[in-house]
């Protein structure tokens, strides 16, 4: 099997970049390139990870400044060319701000930081990220203050019609429209989600329901 060429981008304020890189290396069984946000070029890659954290201190809007970092121009170009991009938590916010995903992430409905495990439904298995999941709910942790996914009625109808809702909350922790926890890009090679699959790859971490996401990527990309 050919090794997957993966990279994780780090922004000022990222704090889940190492977690994401370790999870990728553990399951993809290949080194993961660490990329600083000021880079303007990337080597040939199969997968780019945009991690969680508080990029640029969440000033202006969460992810707004990071979306304008030099590296994001190249990330957008690669995504448009078909490279897989996974954005987790703050990474999801960055991908919406960069225009790779529709909608926006705003303050949680209860105006409080939410940090707990949540149950999710895999809304579609027809993607390189979710193809490894079977029937039944999964459990992943969330940790965010601005995880309330909003999208207008027309955009929501488009997401549903194109089967691009990837994950839904069973007990919505933040007020997200239609219980949406993760969405796919138009080409289905970009996924943004608020829950953290990289924090759920070993039973010792509290659960391992994040593993099938990375295994699915391995099977799709290798």
Image (cartoon, rainbow, N blue to C red):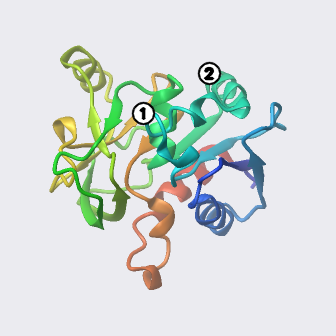
Tell me the residue at 47%/68% (across/down). Answer: 199
Disc with the residue nearer the chain's start (1 vs 2): 2
Residue placed furthest toward the top:
154
- Relative image position of residue 188 (x, y in whole percent): 48, 30
Q: Is residue 174 above or below residue 201?
A: above
Disc 1 to disc 2: CB gap under 8 Å: no
In the displayed structure, does residue 218 sit left or right of residue 134? right
On residue 80, the disc is 2
Q: Position of residue 83 (x, y in %)?
A: 65, 33
Hey, which quadrant is residue 42 in on the image?
top right
Q: Nearer the viewer, residue 17 or 106?
A: 106
Query: How far apart, in angstroms, are the residues tagged by discs 1 and 2?
Result: 13 Å
Vertical side of 191 occupied by 17: above or below: below
Taking the spot 46% from the left edge, 41% from the top edge, the residue there is 92
Q: Residue at x 46, y 34 (%)?
A: 60
Look at the image and tell me whether residue 187 can be seen.
yes
Q: Position of residue 176 (x, y in %)?
A: 22, 41
Nearest the eye: 137 or 94? 94
Q: Secondary structure at mark 2?
A: helix
Question: Label 1's element?
Answer: strand
Dot 1 corresponds to which residue? 184
The residue at the point 44 percent across, 54 percent down is 132
Residue 116 appears at what percent x and percent y? 29, 68
């Amino acid at each position: 099997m050919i090794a997957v060429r993966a990279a994780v981008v780090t922004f000022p304020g990222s704090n889940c970049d190492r977690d994401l890189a370790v999870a990728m290396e553990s399951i993809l069984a290949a080194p993961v390139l660490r990329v600083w946000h000021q880079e303007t070029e990337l080597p040939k890659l199969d997968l780019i990870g945009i991690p969680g954290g508080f990029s640029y201190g969440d000033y202006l809007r969460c992810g707004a400044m990071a979306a304008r970092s030099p590296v994001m121009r190249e990330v957008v170009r690669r995504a448009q060319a078909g490279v897989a991009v996974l954005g987790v938590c703050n990474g999801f916010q960055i991908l919406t701000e960069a225009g790779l995903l529709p909608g926006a992430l705003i303050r949680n409905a209860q105006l409080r930081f939410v940090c707990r495990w949540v149950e999710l439904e895999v809304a579609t298995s027809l993607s390189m990220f979710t193809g490894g999941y079977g029937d039944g709910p999964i459990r992943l942790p969330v940790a965010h203050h601005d995880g309330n996914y909003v999208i207008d009625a027309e955009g929501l109808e488009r997401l549903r019609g194109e089967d691009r809702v990837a994950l839904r909350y069973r007990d919505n922790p933040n007020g997200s429209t239609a219980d949406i926890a993760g969405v796919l890009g138009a080409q289905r090679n970009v996924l943004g989600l608020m829950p953290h699959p990289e924090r759920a790859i070993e039973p010792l971490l509290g659960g391992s329901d994040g593993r099938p996401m990375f295994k699915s990527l391995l099977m799709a990309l290798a």
